[in-house]
Image (cartoon, rainbow, N blue to C red):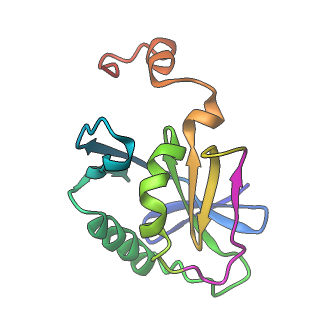
Amino acid sequence: MKKFTYKGLPFGINKGRMYCLIPIFLDIETSNNHAENPAELRTWIVSIQVLFNGKYHLFRYPEQFVEFYNGLYKKYNLQNNGKFPKVLLTYIHNASYDLSYLVPYINQLPDNDMDKQGIIEGPNKFLTYVRGPFEFRCSYRLSGMSLEKWSKEYNIEHKKQ
C-alpha cells in the first residue's frame, strides 16, 4: 500500500481509493420513556461520542454530529475530485443499533456521487454503510466479539457495565 500524508493525516491507497489510516470511533447513548405499550415507546439520542486523531468529541444533538462530519469534509477536501477518492473510516460497535438512529442524519452529508453502498446481512445487520467519503463499519460484526469478550481478550481495565 502506498502511504503519504495529506493535511497532517496519513493516507494509503487501496483498491482505487485513498483511505485515511486514522479511523474515527463512534458510539451513541440512547434513552426511552419505558412505556409498557410498544405503540407508546419513544426513544431518543442522549449523546454521541467520537474519537478522532487523538481528540474526543461529545455531541448532545445529532445536528452537531452532522456539523462535525461536514467540517471534516471541508477540512480534508473530501469531495471526489480526482483519480483516487478520499475515504474516512468510522468504526461503530453494534452499528445496526447506532445506525438505526444516525442514518437519517448521515444521509444529510455530501455524497460525492460515489458508489453508494451498504452491506446488510439481514434485518438490522449492518456490516458497512457508505455516504460519499464516509464509510461506517461495524466493529462487532467485523471482529465477531462483544465488548465484554473484547475487554477480556485485550485485558482492558475499564470494561462495559
Q: State the image coordinates of residue 9 (x, y, percent, origin top left).
A: 47, 62
Is residue 8 highlighted in magenta? Answer: no
Asked if residue 15 is positioned above or below residue 92 in the image, the reply reads below
Q: State the image coordinates of residue 44 (x, y, percent, origin top left).
A: 29, 52
Asked if residue 134 is positioned above or below residue 1 in the image, the reply reads below
Q: Residue, x 63% and y 27% (percent of image)?
A: 144
Span shown in magenta: 111-121
Quarter occupied by residue 68: bottom left
Relative to the observer, which residue lies in front, 147 or 55?
A: 147
Relative to the observer, which residue lies in front, 55 or 37?
A: 37
The main secondary structure of the magenta stretch is loop
Please state, as top left, top right, bottom left or bottom right, where the N terminus lies in the image: bottom right
Outermost residue toward the bottom in this view: 81
Please state, as top left, top right, bottom left or bottom right, where the C terminus lies in the image: top left
Is residue 54 something that shows in the picture?
no
Horizontally, residue 26 falls left or right of residue 92, namely left
Q: Residue, x 47% and y 76% (percent of image)?
A: 109
Horizontally, residue 34 falls left or right of residue 152, namely left
Q: State the image coordinates of residue 19 (x, y, percent, origin top left).
A: 62, 61
Is residue 75 something that shows in the picture?
yes
Q: Residue, x 26% and y 43% (percent of image)?
A: 32
